[in-house]
Image (cartoon, rainbow, N blue to C red):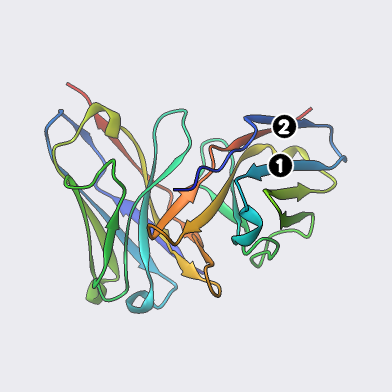
Amino acid sequence: SYVLTQPPSVSVAPGKTARITCEENNIGRKSVHWHQQKPGQAPVLVVYDDSDRPSGIPERFSGSNSGNTATLTISRVEAGDEADYYCQVWDSGSDQVVFGGGTKLTVL
Amino acid sequence: QVQLVESGGDLVKPGGSLRLSCEATGLTFSRSYMSWIRQAPGKGLEWISYITDSSRYRYHADSVKGRFTISRDNAKNSVFLQMNSLRVEDTGVYYCAYGPVPCGGDCYYIANWGQGTPVTVSS
């Protein structure tokens, strides 16, 4: 089964670019999705199918996926982007949804 | 827009039972796969169950298999989670979610989340 590895934490200054990774062997062959969870709130989908954004999600959020690493990139980071971010894939072998362990983004 | 409203969370003793409900609006419910996902205090997200649109297939994570059962009532736009033989480690917030939603080939994602309902298992 899939085990998606994310760094526990990432820190970035306001206005800079944050990159959050999600690693698994050959994850580039999968479609990766990203969910944002602000403190005390439910998660929200911010990127799906590697790089597509649901309506209402700012263009500052983008995604890429190749080889063994998928990346969520947040440009021009704002204080309001401080949250936990989770990657997610579909494991077709077991017909299950799989989440990464989550990354806490801190805006300095 | 899609709205998911959970209910039924409570404080229950180990070994007890609980039934969670989720009412959905803003989507064609009878054609939608639905999931339950939980989050233990201070921990990450754990998918635990999903059900296909017609209830033909139901999947449960190994951690809850044999104890939890997902079901749905398309006439009421509702999905349920029957939780039996509850353990302390089942404590957490339980989210109802729209998905997995297909996006082509081997691509499925969780599209929308409810606000969650808290479950506490403690003596």
- Indicate the chain on which mark 2 is placed: A
**Is A36 situated left or right of B28 in this image?**
right
* Residue A97 image point, x, y percent: 44, 54
Question: Looking at the image, how many numbered discs can be counted on the residues?
Answer: 2
A49 or A24, which is in the foreground? A24
Neighbour class for label 2 at 10 Å: few (<14), some, many (≥20)? some
Q: Quadrant of the C terminus of chain B?
A: top left
Q: Element type at marker 1? A: strand
N-term-proximal mark, 2 vs 1:
2
Neighbour class for label 1 at 10 Å: few (<14), some, many (≥20)? many
Three-letter amino acid code of the residue under disc 1:
Ile
* Residue B64 image point, x, y percent: 25, 43
**Is A61 situated left or right of B1 in this image?**
right
**Is B26 situated left or right of A63 in this image?**
left
Circles 2 and 1 on the same chain = yes
Mark 2 highlights which residue? A10
Residue at x-position 21% and y-position 24%: B122
Q: Is residue B62 above or below residue A32?
A: above
Residue at x-position 87% and y-position 40%: A16
Q: Which mark is residue A20?
A: 1
